[in-house]
Image (spheres, grey):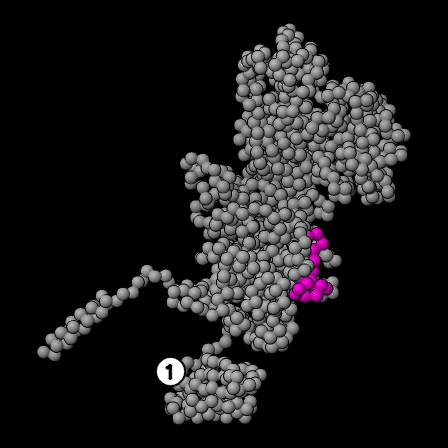
Amino acid sequence: MKISLNWLEEILGSKVPASPKEISEKLFSLGFEVSSVTTYPKVTGVVAAKILGIEKHPNADKLRLAKVTDGSITETVVCGAPNIESGQVVFWARVGAVLAEGMEVKKAAIRGVESPGMLCSLKELGVGDSHAGIWVLDEKVPLGSAVQELVSLEDAVFDIEVTPNRPDALSITGIAREIAAAFNVKWAPPHYKFETRASLSFYPVDIEDRGGCSRYVAKKFSNVSVRSSSPKIQARLIRSGIRPINNIVDITNYILLETGQPLHAFDADKLEGGKIVVRRARDKEKILALDGKTYDLDTDILIIADTKRPVAIAGVMGGEATAVTGETKNILLESAIFSRGLVRYGKNKLKLSSESSYRFERGVSRWSVQAGSDAAEALIEENAGGRIEAFSNVQSNPDEKVPSLTVRNSYIQGVLGEKVLITEIAQIFQKLGVTVQSSSDEGLTVQSPEWRVDLDLEADYAEEIARVRGYQRIPSQGRMVRLPETAGQAGKFYSLNRVRSAFSALGFDEALNYGLVSRESAEAVLPKDSWAELENPLASDHSVLRPALAIELLANLKSNLSYQKKDVRFFETGTVFHKEGDKVTERLRAGAVAAGKSQDASWQVKNPSDIDFYWIKGAAEEVLKRAGVSASFVKGGESSVSKLLHPVYYMAVMGDGKKVLGAFGVIHPAIAKKWDLPSGTVILEIDLFTTEWSSKYESIRKISLLPEIERDCSFWMKKETPWEAVHSEIESVLGTVLKACRVFDVYADPSKPGHKSLSFTLTFQHPEKTLSDDEANALRDKAAAALAKKFGAELRKK
Amino acid sequence: MLSALEAKRTELDDKELKKSLEAEAGDPTLPSLPFRVGRVHPITQVMNEITQIFLGLGFAVAEGPEAETDENNFGALNFLPDHPARDMHDTFFVKSSPLLLRTHTSPVQIREMKAAKPPVRIIAPGKVYRHEAIDATHSSVFHQVEGLVVDKGVSFADLKGTLEMFVRRFFGADVRTRFYPSYFPFVEPGAQMDISCTVCAEAKAKNGSSCPVCKGSGWIEMLGAGMVHPNVFKAVGYNPEEVSGFAFGMGVERISMVRYGVADMRLFYGNCLDFISQFVR
């Protein structure tokens, strides 16, 4: 909200004893962030003058010569603006004048005609940005008046952010109160003598929806003259970002800025039946609003109606049909308290917000509804010549008292961590307009000021005390703490970092993704009913909660490949979402993708092998080991990423309980083609910290210092014999003496169709003795015999 | 005699070795073998460091789901229905489900207090979602670390002491802080904490600053905090007359931007290898 310092000082009735910078700092420490301060300089040498006549410029088509008078001196001024007309009152900057941007007006010849000064637009006076035309004033402005008497141009305007809990501060008066409290400025708050005008006739107001409108103050003015506002009001509105319309509309806006109370003026003669009805809209009712658009209303929207039709969307915007125009003679001024929720509903439903709705949904007060009405009344009588003729003040709970509350000293000390003297608290309350009803050893019994709608609890008063004193005055301390049972419990923190460090050691960089994917990509992974969608996505490619990490990781891979990267490995840990029936479930997962070489090429290793299925299998083993999961890999086996994976080069990760934890493998050729990825791309995805994940540590195996002995052997066997079966047979036959078994060659020979050659090294180590060559040979032969028997394998002779 | 012979042999051996070493034509300035080590994402690194500092202060790590109930995300946190305070949190809703994507990590406070009795001393690092268009300084997805301390007699002074301790550990011993009033519905009094600009603090003191990080103000917005609102205690079944507490929440991206001089938040989610590979620590 824009706050003009000279307007604020006008309300205070005195200067604020501080510079704009000091004021900004004070506001900041009170909880109002000042995002900018704009200072406007003094403008001198400019007077109101009347245009007596206009002639053509002899040497230029776009320029004209205006004969102007300030009441005593008459001269001819060159003017380029198209909007001047004879009879207008305008601002004339005479020779020697100093304008807003510091420019001094000099006598000059313009295209051969001498010009004693110039006529001013808003911009030259520093009021607005509009350079479009000369600022035309009301014709009643006395000629010869200096601009500084008519308009307070010299000013500092603060742009202040007001948090939603402080609607009372959404006005010049609201900020003035804060400034007065902070700088100890004595002032008499604007005194509005709101009274019931028994002498006036009653203006009929019928509040049908009492819950929607707790108070409605109506004042009817007769014989108003609608014209343009005074330069001062116009300038203040423009600097606050509001366009002047006419004196009546301008007054409602001006008072909104000054008191925070939204007001509305109707053309009283256009209110059918001469009556105001506050009710919900009826089905299919419509209204043409002041913004020129027609809105379809519904039965939850609060409206103001006359006896026939809606005339305003309550608290949001008035209707065109009853708008104040140049022809208006009688007006009805509304000042009301509407339900915050209903105004907010109407605003959201119609997608129509205004300065009024902004304040109503935050809350207007018992103070502002009266002060706003009275202040506007005074201005209407002064500036539009209207006379009040009818009045009504309808309210739900006229006798409702502001509740009292005791603010205990002990409570304040407990919250703030220091003792604040009761006298200081009383002073702070007094500055803020909080009524102190009584004082005792326990504390102060108080009533909130009428304008504050946010002071309900002791905690709220604790903040007021802290705020006015300044948060910097609260001590800072590290208390002796009672450590809870859980102190230092890190949850998944360390385990998750172990998983991350495993991936990092394997050369995977960590990716971080939004977790939102397109429907199309989600469909490629899982059927539609198993993932969750957003009701209100920002974009269609971010509309589904990711059912797998691989979708975004593959996109990351692809984008890096498009930047000429050749070897890319990414992992991510994060939540995936699935839907079972109506239930959305979340799982924490680790995912990884990779493509390129298994090792970076160098001058020593010129041609490293490609990343392939066995590479990602190794990565999967390493990660699971590091995480303490005992899992086995099975061929086939459904998992939530199986659709992305190659039908052959794919294995599911099974926990001990035969539950699928995830899968890894080479990308499915169809997906690789569809998503334009290298056919050798590998994918790994596993659920983290399911019951299979163990935090137990295993006891170590005994270390033997006896020598190891190796035997190589090669076998012919049927092509389909899986290594895993061969391996487990060897292990079961040889027992613990077999320390390791490492495959070093697999190949097929056209001379042996249907067969493959499998070569491996057996490493033996006996726990108690050194094995002899003969013993080692015997062990190898034992294995060979077992393989021959079980798989028909044939030991190849060297 | 023997020892003289031994000495002569050693001398000859040394000569030989020296000769062969001099003949060695290797070039140690050739590039090293390219060991490939993956880098941990800067957001993870920063979040880990914050977590570790609080673990050291006796906090426990707590967590909650990312798809939350309206009650946990708003209602229990004293966001009244239809109050404009909700406008501060533009929200993603899950289709045909009562859930929404949590807009802050504060619902973990509610879960934690509903599950345990005081004293409570937790932090909750995690991912949050806002229905906001993505640009250099806004993201529809980001990370927060939430903190909550509840016990008998916890005061605003404890809040200040704890958070000052944290920023000194994280940014260094000479970092200064300032606290000022702010509004979050679930705390009262509410506060914002700034830290002195880590980029230009010294330069500014001397000759003013046009620092892009603090925009010349010398201060960086660091976190929101405050004393737990009595209505929050009531919502979780704690008695606000018996216990008090403070809560705080900080944006991990924001802190990372300051630490690493990242001007555009989107870089964190771009997953560009040239970006991530720079975070070698």
Q: Is residue A82 above or below residue A440?
A: above
Specify the amino acid type for callout 1.
Leu
Specify whether B82 is left or right of A149. right
Callout 1 environment at 10 Å: few (<14), some (14 to 19), or many (20+)? Answer: few
Please check the rendered image and state whether residue A531 is part of the magenta-colored stretch, yes or no: yes
Nearer the observer, A184 or A259: A259
Q: Is residue B87 visible?
A: yes
Compared with residue B173, is residue A352 higher up or lower down, i.e. above or below? above
Please say whether residue B20 is one of the residues in the magenta stretch. no
**Is residue A686 something one can see in this rendering?**
no
Secondary structure found at label 1: loop
Residue annotated with mark 1: A705
Q: Quadrant of residue A545?
A: bottom right
Q: Position of residue A772 (x, y in %)?
A: 38, 91
Q: What range of the chain is rendered magenta?
A: A522-537
Residue A364 percent across, percent down from the top left: 72, 36
The residue located at (60%, 33%) in the rendering is: A159
The residue at 55%/49% (across/down) is B265
Residue A245, quarter of picture: top right
Q: Nearer the viewer, residue A109 or A357?
A: A109
B104 up-or-down from A235: above or below: below
Nearer the observer, A566 or A661: A566
